[in-house]
Structure formats: C-alpha cells, structure tokens
C-alpha cells in the first residue's frame, strides 16, 4: 500500500454542516438517550426463515428519564396547553387521548421495520394502506430459496364455524400428505433457477413460485396506524401466521412507548364493544332482540367474558 497521502475525491466526502446561522438554537432540558440503546436493529425471528426487525424510531432520542411517548404528549400540549409535566400526568393524558380517539398525537411517533415473511402473509399485510413500503424486487433479483412450512401440529383443520379460518390440528396422516405437497411445490425452485439461467426474465419466471416463498420489505408507519394494524392482526380472528408477526412487532415497540401500549391494552385489546341491542339485553335481563345466529353467538361469548353465565 502506498504511503503517499491521497487527496480525497470531493465526491466521496460529505460536509457535515451545523444549523443555519439564522436559526435560534434551543439546548435540551436533559441529556438525550437513544430509545434503541445505540443498536442498529432489534430483530425477532418468526417461524423458520422470517423476522421482524425494528431498524429506526422517531423520536430516536428522548430526554433522559422519558420514553418516546413524550413526543405524543408534546404534540397534544399544542392543543391542551403546557399544563402537564410529570410522567404520571403524561400517562393520564395519553390514556385520555387513546380512550377518546384523539388520534393525531399518536401519529407523531413512527417506527421503521425490516420484515421477511411469506408472500401469503405479505398479501394480508399490504392491505394496511397507511404505511410506507419498499419491497424486494423479484424482477431485479433472484428470489432466495426460502419457503414457509408449518409444523405438523400447525396444519389446521378447516373450521366449521368460521369459513375463513382453521382451528385444531388435522390428523397426522393428512397433515403429512399436505407437508409433502408443500415439499413438491418447493421443488419448483430448482426449475425456476435453471430457467432464469437459460435466460427467462426473472419478472415472469417468478410466476412459477408458490405463495409460501418469502419476500422482504421495509415498512414505516406511525404509531396510530401501527396500533390499528396490531388490533386487527393480533386479534384471534387473524390468521395465526400474521399474528405471530404482529406479536413480534408489538414486543419490539412496547418498551419504547410503554404508556401508549398500556393504554392500548386497557382500551383496545382487553376492551369490549357492546351493541345497542346488547346494552338493552343487559339492562332488561331479556334475551337479545335479534334472531341472527351469529349475533346471538357473539353476545353469548361476551356474556361469558363478562362472567354473566
Ligand atoms: C380477520 C380479517 C379478515 C379479513 N378478510 C378479508 C377478506 O376476506 N377479503 C378482503 O378483501 N380483505 C379482508 N381483510 C382486510 C380488511 O378488509 C382490511 O382491508 C384490512 O384489515 C385493512 O384495514 P384498514 O383499511 O382499516 O387499514 P388501513 O389500510 O391501514 O387503514 C387505516 C384506516 O385509514 C383509513 N383509510 C386508509 N385508506 C383509506 C382510503 N383509501 N379511503 C378511506 N379511508 C382510508 C380507514 O379509516 C382505515 O380504517 C380482512 C382483515 C382481517 C383483519
């Protein structure tokens, strides 16, 4: 290696500038701490090949002794005045905002994730339109050799009560037959690869791959819409595979916005909505004034949850 000093190419250097001279600088009240503890990412594996990784947070830096919930409180104070300052007052304000669906302060916090999931999960996920997404391009690159295969216990029987779902495991022989079908579909990968090597364009060759193959994306979303996503996708009505991802996502953000998550659990996840008919049945002690089978079953489930049966 030459000992000569090389003049750096101006194209390779970036000048780090300070604030513009005409900006008034306000120092922080307390030293900042990084909500991700100085780490580049926090990654939770999901199934055999998937993961949810938190790669950034806004705010990333918060005053010592506070959490990222402080960005919600800061924004809310624009509308409610600078009345609250202590953590317990912040907690009360956040709980009030969430209870009363005053949602925009929750949009002041954002999280960015890197996620790897099977395409059939991605199809459900992409329906959540309020996120910013950038996905791996199977036109530009070869699809990696990764496929989702459930455990044998997780090959579920078609539910008879819920046409969209599966419930308990199917008997072992049929489960094994299904896993063999998945194995056969994965074997298409070698043919996909060899045909791309023969010159078939990647954008059309991928049509031969099953929806159990993995994709990846960066997914950035604000906290209000993340909580909406989680309330739908951590719910027992969501397919177990996407629920596993949603739960991993929730675990990643819980420690960063603990006050919001506590309120979310109290007022959304563990809460219950009663219909007008249900309130009337409760008040009168009479059966639900509806002959609809599903509505009656839902009322029965709620009564059970309330300890009324
Ligand atoms: C258990 C379950 C089963 C499902 N089954 C099916 C199914 O069989 N078929 C199917 O097609 N989908 C199905 N879905 C998807 C579902 O219908 C929604 O598309 C999905 O959950 C996204 O919900 P969202 O629109 O509220 O969320 P987001 O897209 O994240 O939007 C959040 C909120 O922003 C607002 N918003 C966003 N974009 C718009 C817009 N363009 N116009 C107006 N308001 C907007 C809405 O208030 C919305 O609630 C299912 C979802 C679940 C959880």
Image (cartoon, rainbow, N blue to C red):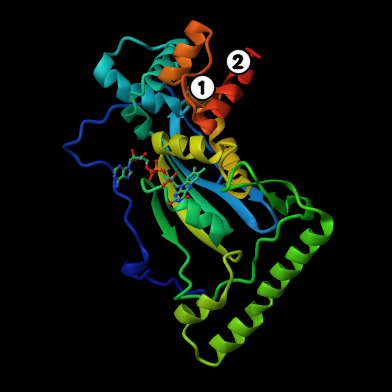
Query: Quarter for ligand 1?
Result: top left
Where 86 sits versus 195, above or below? above
Q: Against 254, is 190 above or below?
A: below
- Find numbered disc 2 in the image and state the secondary structure of the residue it sits on: loop
**Residue 2 appears in view:** no
**Which residue is pictured at 37% across the width and 20% down the height?**
97
The image position of residue 47, as x and y in percent, is 68, 53
Residue for point 42% across, 22% down = 30
**Disc 1 secondary structure class:** loop
Spatial CA distance of label 1 from label 2 is 10 Å
Please say if the residues under marks 1 and 2 sit with CB atoms less than 8 Å apart.
yes
Residue 199 lies, with reference to residue 166, above or below; the image says below
Q: Residue 28 placed where, x, y %?
A: 36, 25
State which quarter of the image contains the C terminus.
top right
Residue furthest to the front in view is 291
Between residues 164 and 267, which one lies in front from this camera angle? Answer: 164
> Is residue 262 shown left or right of residue 81?
right
- For mark 2, what is the residue? 306
The residue drawn where x is 48% and y is 72% is: 138
| Residue at x 30% of width, y 18% of height | 77
Q: Residues within 10 Å of mark 1 (few under 14, many from 20)?
A: few
Q: In the rendered image, which residue does mark 1 sit on?
A: 272
> Dot 2, crowdedness within 10 Å: few (<14), some or many (≥20)?
few
């Amino acid at each position: 290696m030459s000992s000569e000093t090389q003049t750096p190419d101006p194209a390779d250097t970036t000048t780090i500038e300070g604030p513009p001279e005409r900006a008034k600088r306000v120092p922080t009240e307390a030293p900042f701490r990084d909500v991700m503890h100085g780490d580049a990412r926090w990654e939770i594996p999901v199934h055999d090949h998937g993961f949810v990784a938190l790669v950034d947070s806004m705010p990333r830096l918060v005053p010592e002794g506070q959490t990222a919930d402080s960005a919600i409180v800061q924004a809310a104070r624009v509308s409610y005045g600078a009345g609250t300052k202590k953590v317990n007052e912040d907690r009360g304000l956040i709980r009030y905002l969430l209870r009363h669906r005053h949602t925009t302060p929750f949009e002041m916090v954002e999280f960015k994730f890197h996620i790897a999931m099977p395409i059939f999960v991605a199809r459900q996920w992409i329906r959540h339109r309020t996120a910013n997404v950038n996905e791996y391009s199977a036109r530009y690159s070869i699809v990696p050799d990764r496929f989702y295969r459930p455990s044998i216990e997780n090959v579920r029987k078609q539910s008879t009560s819920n046409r969209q779902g599966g419930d308990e495991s199917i008997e072992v022989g049929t489960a094994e037959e299904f896993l063999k079908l998945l194995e056969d579909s994965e074997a298409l990968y070698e043919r996909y690869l060899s045909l791309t090597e023969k010159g078939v364009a990647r954008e059309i060759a991928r049509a031969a791959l099953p929806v159990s193959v993995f994709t990846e994306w960066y997914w950035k979303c604000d906290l209000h819409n993340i909580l909406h996503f989680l309330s739908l996708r951590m719910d027992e009505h969501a397919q177990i595979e996407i629920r596993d991802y949603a739960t991993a996502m929730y675990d990643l953000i819980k420690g960063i916005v603990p006050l919001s998550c506590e309120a979310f659990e109290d007022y959304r996840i563990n809460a219950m909505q009663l219909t007008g008919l249900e309130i009337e049945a409760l008040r009168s002690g009479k059966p639900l004034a509806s002959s609809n089978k599903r509505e009656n079953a839902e009322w029965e489930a709620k009564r059970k949850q309330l300890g009324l049966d």
